[in-house]
Image (spheres, coloured by chain):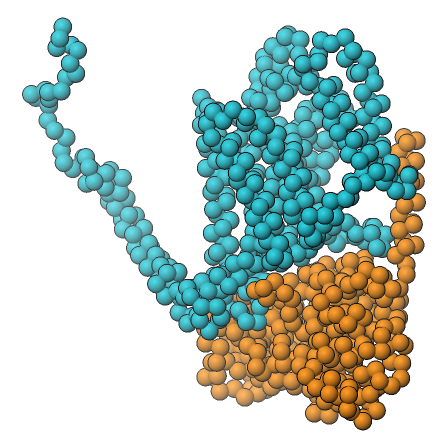
Amino acid sequence: MAGRAQPVQQEHPLALRPSAATVGVVGWLRQKLFSSPLNAALTFLALYILYLVIPPLVRWAFIDADWVGSTREACRREGACWVFIRVWFERLMYGLYPREEIWRINAGYGLLVGAGALLVVPRFPWKHWVGVFLLVVYPVIAFYLFVGGSLTVSLVTLAVILALIGGTAVRLAPAFRDRAWIAGWRRAYPVFALGALAWLALGERLLGSAPLTVSVHLWPMVETRLWGGLFLTLVIAAVGIVGSLPLGILLALGRRSELPVVRGICVAFIEVWRGVPLITVLFMASNMFPLFMPEGVNFDKLLRALLGVTIFASAYMAEVVRGGLQAIPKGQYEAAEALGLGYWRTMGLVVLPQALKIVIPGIVNNFIGLFKDTTLVLIIGLFDFLGMAQAAASNANWLGFAIEGYVFTGFGFWLFCFGMSRYSQHLERALHTGR
Amino acid sequence: MRQLIRTLGILTALCVTVVAAADAGTLDDVKKKGFVRCGVSQGLPGFSNPDAKGDWTGIDVDVCRAVAAAIFGEPGKVKYLPLSAKERFTALQSGEVDVLSRNTTWTLVRDTALGLNFTGVTYYDGQGFMVPKKLNVRSAKQLNGASVCVNIGTTTELNLADYFRANRMTYKPVVYEKADEVVGAYDAGRCDVYTTDRSGLAAQRLKMKNPDDHVVLPEIISKEPLGPVVRHGDDQWFDLVKWVLYAMLEAEEYGVNSENVDQMKAGSKDPVVKRLLGLEGDMGKNLGVGNEWAYNIVKKVGNYAEIYERNVGPRTPLKLERGANALWKNGGLQYPMPVR
């Protein structure tokens, strides 16, 4: 019995060692690269192409490149002129944002990275609160950090907003579901919500002035026309991504709704926005929209672009999510109904968690596409990451270094897109969608 | 539904009030706001460009700074809005900018049908040719049979065809979509000649591997007068922007520049200089600004020569000679109307 417990380590006397040609480096080479004459030829061809491309590239980008200096004279033009990137680095990152205010952008980044890091820490106890912070509090803080200026808030308006959020939470929270007064609140809620919204929309106009205001002025205002570089690209992408997902989910649900009006509106919305190219949407938002408005009334150009990008991306997102919804077997809906769940609970607790898990690759695909599409804001005169590189390369003192700018921005975009792709693969593994 | 109609009604009423508010003159608006909104390009060498510090530079930019100097005595009171070629006119028409200073060619259609007014010419541009030095070509008349790199679908392409037809010469067009492609093809030797506006030639030449191997031929085959644009129908503002340019030219003509302007103001006996610098007459008042207007322009932005030299002149990388942009006295086209 003792022999059984021991693993068999001795080789069978008749067993032969594998031939040296099938294991190790040689075996790998033979199997993967030279398994047939054709494959061998293709391998040599690939090596030859690499030989043609790699050495000149390395020579251009590293060996012959110029790294130090601060003027165009520092570049001998034999290899890449990274001096150009160094001199313009701040502009490429922050656009025309005033230099003494750049710390605000960095603070915004820092806060985001810090909170994000807490989410990644395994078994961090207050993850929910960090999530709430990132989705609700952070955008407000970031907005004031990036825009700044005097913020005048009416205490009444603030109270109405808080009451609206609180009232809605009470209306929806499961904790109060069995209380006696909840039925009354449900009946009163539509009136309350409409009243609050109406006040927010028109209250101050009707009164002529905002009652009980408090003013905050921590740092000067930086207009969005000065935003640019990678910062602007990230802002547009983040707003587009964060905005398009919930909107897309609602649209997808609406498109599968049994109420004909809701369905009709959603189908029309999706098909219209999916049917026009993004460049047209941006162009309309930038050029046609101001003509429809009376002279002197101007929406912020960046705001128009953000709206355009979000709406456009949400139409695509809706179709991705709809794909996931269709993949959920009917039994799941029926089981949820049998448990007595209403529409929103069926969707929120049973269907959507499964559907969204299935379509993670599609969603991230959309995000990556959206991230790269942000460069189109160039045509409406915003200096995003790429636009800033082009503006830099057309400065009279730095003409002729466009390639360095393109290589640098291309690498930047690749880093972000690759990061998103890796993160989505991690999510898929973590959520076991592969099955 | 009734609610919807009522909401729409309220919105319309709001819009109408806003229109009424915006109807005042541009100059009054600008004074009230405290800054000039200036539409510029997204980056054209020497004309309007952000520099590595994030400040705007260029001839077109200096025009806006001069307008701000005339109104506020402070050239920094400008907000720049980079505009693409397609959106520039909309931005002006819709009131997003007060003045469009964005290398815009003055043409009849733009001046009339678009509801705009050109206030003058800051830079006389025109289409020219560039050839490699080794071809030993001295004049465009020697280009018979040459292959020419040109942007497709531009007026440049049409001007090229006109010029060769008028001179009974033949050529082989080599066309590309983007300016960078055209330059790349020319630099790689795929054509003998490269043609675009002369200020553009100067800029593109710097992108070549060896800029000194190429020369620009003397012929100019098209007219491209570039100037600031304002909205049609606001004569006061139109006058101001127009005279800001004249003041810079007049200052050059009478030898007033940013360095000697204080000296001139204190000691000059020339009545023209005295009128220009606000010592005599009510020039500024007639324009709706202070009488120090031209003094502030010259002191804080410079006269036309200084602006030219600083941005595109022979000592900049662009190395553009004054040519047609010299004063009329020196054989150029720049002729300021008398400030009196």
Q: Front-most of A394 and B86? A: A394
Where is residue A172 drawn, in percent x and y?
Answer: 71, 19
Above or below — where is A120 with respect to B267? Answer: above
Quadrant containing the N terminus of chain A is top left
Name the residue furthest left: A13
- Compared to residue A108, the image places residue B42 above or below, namely below
Q: Which residue is pictured at 77% across the width and 63% down the height?
A: B35
Q: Which chain is orange?
A: B
Residue B13 on image: x %, y %: 92, 45
* Residue A25 in view here: yes
Horizontal relation, residue A47 to residue A277: left or right: left
Front one among B35 and A267: B35
Residue B265, position in %: x, y? 77, 86
In which quadrant of the rendered image does the C terminus of chain A lie? top left
Left or right, residue A364 beside residue A12: right
Residue lying at 85% horizontally and 73% vertically, measured from the top left: B289
Q: Quadrant of residue B339?
A: bottom right
Which image quadrant for residue A203?
Answer: top right
Q: What is the count of numbered marks?
A: 0
Which residue is at a point 72% across and 31% down the rendered structure image? Answer: A266
Residue at screen point 68% across, 28% down: A250
Q: Which chain is cyan?
A: A
Q: Is residue A59 above or below residue A428?
A: below
Vertical comparison of B159 with B275: above or below: above
Residue A384 makes an appearance in the image: no
